[in-house]
Image: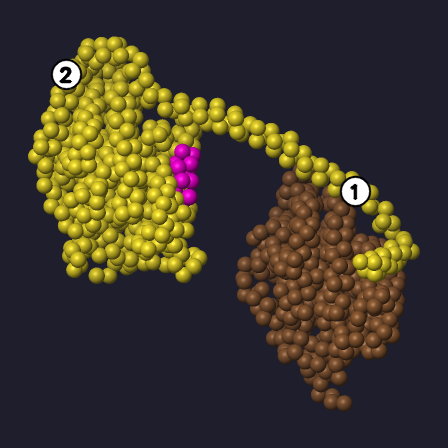
C-alpha cells in the first residue's frame, strides 16, 4: 500500500491534526490557561480553511475507496467556513458556568462530525460512505444532548439517536440489497450492473431515506422539530446548515454517479418528496411560535428547495446546489446568530418576545431582517439569486410544474418570515428586550454573514467560479 | 482643441447640488447662495469658452462644424450596436443651448439673492436650482436619445421640486403634482418612441445607419411621433399645456428659468435634435407638428389676451412663443439651408426668446416683489416707482412684439418667412398671431405701468425699485435683447450645418412690423388710460367668449371630465372592484386554506419516537410501491 496517498487527503488530514491539537490542549491545560481556548480553536480552524481553500485535482485513492473532486474540496471549504461561524457564535454559550468545563468536548465532537461529513462526501464505496455518515451522526447526538441536565436537551439527543439508529438500520438494509444484487460496493462498479429491478428500487429508496433523514426531508423529518428546539442553539444552527449541506451534496453525487441508470426512478421519487416537503414544512412553519422550532420547519422547507437542484442531475444543478448551500449558510447562520445572542443575553426564544425589538436593538433587528429576507428569496439579497439558480436548474430539465409549485410555496414562506419582521418592527411593545451589546466574536460572525447576504448574489464571480468545477450526469 | 474640460460643466452643478443638499441647512443663507452662484459663474465661463473655441475653430472641409464627443462612456451594452452611453456631444445646437442655459441660470441665481431673501428653505432652493441646471445641461449635451431621456426625467423631477417649493401652500402642491403627472404621462409616449426607435434603428445614437432606417419603413414616423408626444408634454403643446399656467405657483425666478427659458424648450430641442431623421423619413409627421403648433400658438395667444394674473399672461405667452418655434421646425421642407430655413429660425427664436422671456419673468418678479400681488388690478402706474423695471420690461415687450431693432424682430421674421415658404395660409395665420402677441403684451405693459394707480394699496406701502441683485440681471438681459438680433445666427446654426446668410425678407418684415404696430396702437388706445371704456364694452358685448377665454376655453375642465368622469368611473372603479372582490378574496382564501390545513396536519408531529419511526417506514415503503407501480 502506498502511504503517500494520505497526503492527497489534505482536508481530512489537516482536520485530524486540528482535532488532535484541540484534544491535547483540552487535556493538558487548566484554569486561566484555557482563556484563549476559543480564540485558538477558531484560529486553527481558520488556518485549516485557508490551507484547503484552493480545490485540488479530481483524484481516486486507496483503490477507489476515496474519491474526491475539485467540487468536493470546495464544499468542504464552505462547510468549514460555516463551522467557524458556528464556533464564533457559540462563545457566549460555551463560557457559561455549566458548560465551561466541557468547552473542549464541544469542539472535538463538532470537528469529528465535520470529519465524518468530509469522509462521507468523498467516499468511493458504500462502506466508506457508511462510516463517514456514522462518524457524522453519533457525535451529533452527543452535541444535541450537550446541556444534559436540561430536560429538553436530553430529549433532543435521545430522539435524535433513536431516529438515527432506525434510519441507519434501514439504510444498511438497503445497501445490503445492493451488494446482494450487484456484488460490489464500489461506486465505480455499481452503475454498470444496475438494472432497476424491484429489489434495487427498494434498496435505492432505503438509501435515500437514510440521507433524507439527515437532510430532514418529509416524511423522514419528524425528529427535526423536537431536536432543533431542545438542542443548544449553536448545535441547532450547526445541524441546520452544515449537516444538511454535506448530506445534500453527497446525495446529489451518489444519485448522479451511482444510481445514474435509475435516473427516472429517483427523479420521480424526488419530485414527490420535494412537493410534500416544501408544502408540509411551510404549513407547519405557519403555526410555530418558538423561534427554534420555527427555524426547524424553515430549514426543512429550504431542504426541499435544495432538492430542486438535485433533481436536475446536471452540472448546472450542482453549481446551484453548492451556491445555494453557501448562501444558505450565510443567511441561516445570520438568523441563528441573532437568535442565539438574544437567547444567551435575554433568555427569550418565543416570537412574542421579539415584539418591538427594533426600538431597543435596531442593529440586531436589521440584521435578522436581512437574513430573513434572504431566506425568503427577496431581491437583491443573495437568497434571491440562489433560489433563482435552483429554479433555473430544475427548469432546464423540464420540471415546469414543480418549479411552479415551489414558487407558490415561496409566497407562503414569505408570510411566515415576515411574521418575525412584523413582530420586530410593527407590533408595539412597552417592554421590549432591553438593549445589550454583543460580544466581539458574535459581531464578527454576524458581519461575515451580512457581507455574504449582501455580496454573494451581486458578485457574479462566485457563481461563475463554482460553475467551472461542476459536474453532472 | 481639447474639450475634456467640458465634463466640469456637468460635474460642477451636480457637486453644488450634493454639497448644498447635504450640508446646506448648516450654512448661512448667503454662503449657500454664494456657492450656488459661484459654481454657475464658472459654468457660464466654461460654456462661453466652449462656444468661443468651438465656433472659433472654423469649419471642417465640408463646410459644417464638426460633431465632437469629448466623452462617451459605454454604460449599458445590449448588443454590439445597441448600447446606452453617457457622454458629452458638442455640435452647434448643443453649444448654443449651453450658452442659453448657463446665462439664464446665472442671471436667475443672482436675481434670487434679492428675490428669495429671508425665505425659509433658501439653501434648499439653491440646491434644487443646481440640480435643475445639471439636468438641463446633461439633456442638451446628451450623446444619445436614452441619455437625453434620463436627463429629461431628471429635469422633470427638479421642475416638480421647484414648483412645489412652497410646499405648505396647497395650490403649489397641486400645481407641482399636476406638472409632474402631465409631463410624465407624455413621457410615456417618449419612452415608447425611444424603444421603437432603438428596435428598428438598432441604436440609440442620433445617427443610425441609413439602411436600417429604410428597412424600418413605416415604423420610423411612429417612433418620431411618439417621441414628440413627450416633447409636447414638456413644451406645453396643446392639449398637454395645462400644467404650465399652474406651474406659476413656483417662485418667480424659477418660472423665468424653467418655465420660460430652458426646460419648456426641451421639446423644441428634441425635434431639432432628431431633425435630420424627421425631414428624411417622416416629413409628414413634421408638418402635422407644425399644424399642432399653429393651433397652440393661436389658442394660447387668445387666452393670454384676457388673463389678469400677470404671470399667467406670461405663461400663455410662453406657450404661444414655443409654438412659434415648433411651427418653424415643422414647416421645413428639406434639409438644405434654404428649405430648412425654419430650423435656423426656430433655433434663433429659441435663443432670443429665452433671453427676453426670462427678462419679462424677472421683471414680473420685481413687480410682484414690490406690490405683493400677481393681479393686474393691484398694479397700475408703476412706471414712476420702478423706472429700471419699467424700461427693461418695455424693451422685452417690444422684442416679443417684433419691433426692430430688438432681437425678437429678427427671429420672428425668419419664422414668418419660413412659414410663407411652406404655405401662405400658415404664413398669414402666424402673422396674425404675432399681432395678437403684440396686443396682449402691451395690454399687460399698460396694465402694469400705466393706467389707474391702486391708491388704496399704495397708501400703506409705496412700491419701490428692486435691489441691485435683482435689477442687474434685468439690465443685463435687456442689453442682450437689444443686441442679440444682430448675431449672424445662420453662420452658427443651420439645418445642414452649412453657413447661411440671413436676408431680411422685406415683404414679410414690413407686413409683420405693420401688424405689430397696429396691434400696439390698438392696445394703447384701449388700455393706456385710467378708464378703459372700449375694453369693458367689448368684454360686456362678447360676454360668453370673454369668459370662455378667461377660463382658458375650459381645457382644464375637459381634462378633468375625461380623467375623473370617464377614466376613473368607467375603467378604474370596476377594476378596483375586481381587485377587492376577486383578486383579494382569492388570496384571502389561499391564506385561510393554508392556515386551516396547517391545523389539520399538526397531528403528525406527535412527539412520540415510535410514531416517528412508523411514519418513516410507511413513507419509505410507500415510495417504493409508488416507484414499482409507475
Query: Which disc is residue B597 wearing?
Result: 1
Colouring:
by chain
Q: Is residue B404 above or below residue A365?
A: above
* Position of B309 relative to A419 (above/below): above
Q: Position of residue B509 (x, y in %)?
A: 11, 33
- Closest to the observer, A370 or B231: B231
The residue at 67%/47% (across/down) is: A408
Viewer-side residue, A66 vs A76 = A66
Alpha carbon separation for disc pair 2 and 1: 87 Å
Q: Main secondary structure of the magenta part?
A: helix
Mark 1: which secondary structure? Answer: helix
Label 1, residues with CA under 10 Å away: few <14, some 14-19, many ≥20: few
What residue sits 84% from the left and 72% below the top? A178
Quarter containing the C terminus of chain A: bottom right
Instruction: Identify the residue position indicated by label 2 in the image.
Output: B525
Q: Secondary structure at mark 2?
A: helix
* Region in magenta: B181-192
**Left or right for A434, reference A134:** left
Q: Mark 2 or mark 1: which is in front?
A: 1
- Chain in yellow, by letter, is B
In the rendered view, tell whether residue B510 sits above or below residue B202.
Answer: above
User: What is the x, y in percent for residue B141?
Assistant: 30, 50
Provide residue B601's location: percent of width, then percent of height: 82, 46
Q: Looking at the colours in the rendered structure, which chain would you say is drawn in brown?
A: A
Q: Residue furthest right?
A: B610
Residue visible at 19% across and 36% down in the picture: B422
- The chain carrying label 1 is B
Amino acid at each position: 500500500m502506498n502511504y503517500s496517498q494520505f497526503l492527497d487527503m489534505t482536508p481530512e488530514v489537516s482536520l485530524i491534526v486540528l482535532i488532535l491539537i484541540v484534544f491535547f490542549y483540552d487535556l493538558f491545560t487548566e484554569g486561566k490557561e484555557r482563556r484563549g481556548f476559543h480564540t485558538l480553536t477558531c484560529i486553527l480552524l481558520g488556518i485549516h480553511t485557508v490551507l484547503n481553500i484552493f480545490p485540488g485535482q479530481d483524484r481516486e485513492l486507496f483503490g477507489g475507496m476515496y474519491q474526491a473532486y475539485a467540487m468536493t474540496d470546495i464544499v468542504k471549504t464552505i462547510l468549514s467556513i460555516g463551522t467557524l461561524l458556528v464556533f464564533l457564535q457559540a462563545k457566549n454559550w460555551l463560557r457559561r458556568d455549566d458548560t465551561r468545563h466541557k468547552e473542549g468536548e464541544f469542539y472535538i465532537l463538532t470537528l469529528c462530525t465535520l470529519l465524518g461529513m468530509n469522509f462521507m462526501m468523498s467516499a468511493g464505496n458504500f462502506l466508506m460512505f457508511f462510516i463517514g455518515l456514522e462518524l457524522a451522526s453519533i457525535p451529533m447526538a452527543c452535541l444535541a444532548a450537550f446541556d444534559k441536565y436540561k430536560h429538553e436537551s436530553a430529549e433532543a439527543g435521545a430522539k435524535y439517536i433513536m431516529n438515527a439508529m432506525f434510519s441507519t438500520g434501514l439504510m444498511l438494509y438497503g445497501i445490503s440489497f445492493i451488494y446482494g444484487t450487484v456484488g460490489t460496493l464500489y461506486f465505480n462498479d455499481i452503475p454498470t450492473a444496475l438494472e432497476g429491478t424491484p429489489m434495487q428500487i427498494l434498496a435505492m429508496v432505503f438509501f435515500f431515506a437514510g440521507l433524507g433523514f439527515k437532510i430532514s426531508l418529509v416524511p423522514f423529518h419528524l425528529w427535526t422539530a423536537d431536536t432543533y428546539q431542545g438542542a443548544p442553539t449553536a448545535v441547532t444552527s450547526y445541524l441546520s446548515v452544515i449537516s444538511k449541506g454535506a448530506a445534500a451534496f453527497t446525495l446529489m453525487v451518489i444519485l448522479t454517479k451511482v444510481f445514474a441508470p435509475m435516473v427516472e426512478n429517483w427523479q420521480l421519487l424526488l419530485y414527490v418528496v420535494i412537493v410534500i416537503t416544501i408544502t408540509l414544512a411551510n404549513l407547519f412553519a405557519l403555526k410555530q411560535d418558538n423561534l427554534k422550532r420555527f427555524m426547524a420547519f424553515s430549514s426543512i422547507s429550504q431542504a426541499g428547495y435544495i432538492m430542486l437542484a438535485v433533481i436536475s442531475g446536471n452540472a448546472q444543478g450542482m453549481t446551484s446546489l453548492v451556491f445555494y448551500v453557501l448562501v444558505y449558510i450565510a443567511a441561516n447562520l445570520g438568523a441563528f446568530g441573532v437568535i442565539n445572542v438574544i437567547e444567551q443575553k435575554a433568555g427569550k426564544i418565543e416570537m412574542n418576545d421579539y415584539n418591538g425589538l427594533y426600538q431597543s436593538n435596531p442593529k440586531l433587528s436589521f440584521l435578522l431582517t436581512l437574513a430573513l429576507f434572504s431566506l425568503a428569496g427577496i431581491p437583491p439579497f443573495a437568497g434571491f439569486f440562489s433560489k433563482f439558480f435552483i429554479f433555473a436548474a430544475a427548469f432546464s430539465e423540464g420540471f415546469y410544474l414543480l418549479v411552479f409549485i415551489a414558487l407558490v410555496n415561496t409566497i407562503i414562506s414569505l408570510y411566515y418570515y415576515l411574521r418575525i419582521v412584523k413582530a420586530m418592527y410593527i407590533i408595539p411593545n412597552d417592554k421590549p428586550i432591553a438593549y445589550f451589546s454583543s460580544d466581539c466574536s458574535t459581531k464578527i460572525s454576524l458581519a461575515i454573514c451580512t457581507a455574504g447576504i449582501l455580496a454573494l448574489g451581486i458578485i457574479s464571480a462566485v457563481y461563475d467560479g463554482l460553475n467551472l468545477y461542476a459536474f453532472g450526469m | 482643441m481639447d474639450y475634456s474640460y467640458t465634463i466640469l460643466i456637468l460635474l460642477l452643478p451636480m457637486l453644488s447640488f450634493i454639497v448644498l443638499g447635504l450640508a446646506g441647512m448648516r450654512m448661512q443663507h448667503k454662503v449657500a447662495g454664494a456657492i450656488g452662484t459661484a459654481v454657475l459663474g464658472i459654468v457660464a465661463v466654461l460654456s462661453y469658452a466652449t462656444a468661443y473655441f468651438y465656433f472659433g475653430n472654423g469649419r471642417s472641409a465640408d463646410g459644417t462644424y464638426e460633431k465632437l464627443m469629448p466623452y462617451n462612456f459605454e454604460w449599458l451594452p445590449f448588443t454590439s450596436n445597441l448600447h446606452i452611453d453617457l457622454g458629452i456631444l458638442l455640435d452647434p445646437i448643443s453649444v448654443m443651448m449651453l450658452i442659453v442655459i448657463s446665462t439664464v441660470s446665472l442671471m436667475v441665481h443672482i436675481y434670487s439673492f434679492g428675490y428669495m431673501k429671508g425665505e425659509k428653505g433658501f439653501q434648499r432652493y439653491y440646491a434644487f436650482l443646481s440640480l435643475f441646471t445639471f439636468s438641463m445641461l446633461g439633456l442638451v449635451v446628451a450623446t444619445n436619445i436614452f441619455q437625453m431621456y434620463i436627463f429629461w426625467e431628471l429635469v422633470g423631477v427638479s421642475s416638480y421640486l421647484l414648483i412645489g417649493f412652497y410646499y405648505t401652500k396647497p395650490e403649489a402642491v397641486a400645481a407641482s403634482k399636476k406638472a409632474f403627472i402631465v409631463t410624465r404621462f407624455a413621457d410615456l409616449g417618449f419612452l415608447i418612441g425611444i424603444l421603437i426607435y432603438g428596435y428598428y434603428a438598432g441604436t440609440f445614437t442620433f445617427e443610425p445607419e441609413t439602411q436600417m432606417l429604410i428597412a424600418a419603413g413605416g415604423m420610423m414616423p411612429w417612433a418620431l411621433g411618439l417621441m414628440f408626444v413627450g416633447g409636447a408634454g414638456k413644451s406645453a403643446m396643446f392639449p398637454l399645456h395645462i400644467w404650465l399656467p399652474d406651474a406659476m405657483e413656483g417662485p418667480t425666478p424659477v418660472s423665468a428659468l424653467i418655465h420660460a427659458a430652458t426646460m419648456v424648450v426641451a421639446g423644441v430641442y428634441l425635434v431639432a435634435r432628431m431633425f435630420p431623421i424627421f425631414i428624411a423619413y417622416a416629413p409628414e409627421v413634421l408638418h402635422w407638428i407644425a399644424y399642432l403648433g399653429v393651433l397652440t400658438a393661436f389658442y394660447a395667444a387668445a387666452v393670454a389676451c384676457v388673463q389678469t394674473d400677470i404671470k399667467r399672461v406670461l405663461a400663455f405667452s410662453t406657450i404661444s412663443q414655443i409654438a412659434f418655434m415648433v411651427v418653424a421646425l415643422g414647416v421645413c421642407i428639406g434639409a438644405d439651408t434654404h428649405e430648412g430655413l425654419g430650423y435656423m429660425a426656430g433655433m434663433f427664436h429659441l435663443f432670443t426668446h429665452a433671453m427676453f422671456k426670462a427678462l419679462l419673468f424677472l421683471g414680473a418678479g420685481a413687480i410682484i416683489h414690490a406690490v405683493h400681488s400677481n393681479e393686474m388690478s393691484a398694479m397700475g402706474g408703476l412706471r414712476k416707482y420702478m423706472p429700471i423695471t419699467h424700461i427693461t420690461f418695455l424693451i422685452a415687450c417690444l422684442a416679443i412684439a417684433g419691433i426692430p431693432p430688438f432681437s425678437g424682430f429678427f427671429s420672428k421674421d425668419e419664422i414668418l418667412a419660413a412659414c410663407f415658404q411652406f404655405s401662405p395660409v400658415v404664413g398669414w395665420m402666424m402673422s396674425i398671431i404675432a399681432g395678437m402677441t403684440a396686443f396682449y403684451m402691451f395690454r399687460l405693459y399698460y396694465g402694469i405701468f400705466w393706467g389707474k394707480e391702486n391708491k388704496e394699496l399704495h397708501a400703506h406701502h409705496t412700491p419701490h425699485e428692486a435691489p441691485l441683485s435683482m435689477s442687474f440681471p434685468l439690465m443685463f438681459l435687456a442689453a442682450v435683447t437689444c443686441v442679440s438680433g444682430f448675431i449672424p445666427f445662420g453662420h452658427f446654426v443651420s439645418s445642414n450645418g452649412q453657413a447661411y446668410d440671413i436676408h431680411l425678407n422685406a415683404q414679410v418684415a414690413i407686413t409683420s412690423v405693420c401688424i405689430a404696430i397696429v396691434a400696439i396702437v390698438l392696445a394703447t388706445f384701449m388700455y393706456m388710460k385710467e378708464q378703459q371704456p372700449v375694453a369693458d364694452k367689448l368684454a360686456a358685448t362678447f360676454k360668453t367668449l370673454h369668459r370662455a377665454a378667461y377660463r382658458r376655453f375650459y381645457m382644464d375642465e375637459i381634462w378633468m371630465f375625461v380623467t375623473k368622469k370617464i377614466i376613473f368611473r368607467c375603467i378604474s372603479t370596476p377594476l378596483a372592484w375586481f381587485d377587492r372582490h376577486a383578486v383579494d378574496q382569492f388570496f384571502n382564501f389561499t391564506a385561510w386554506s393554508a392556515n386551516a390545513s396547517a391545523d389539520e396536519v399538526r397531528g403528525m408531529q406527535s412527539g412520540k419516537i415510535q410514531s416517528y419511526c412508523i411514519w418513516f417506514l410507511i413513507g419509505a415503503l410507500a415510495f417504493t410501491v409508488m416507484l414499482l407501480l409507475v
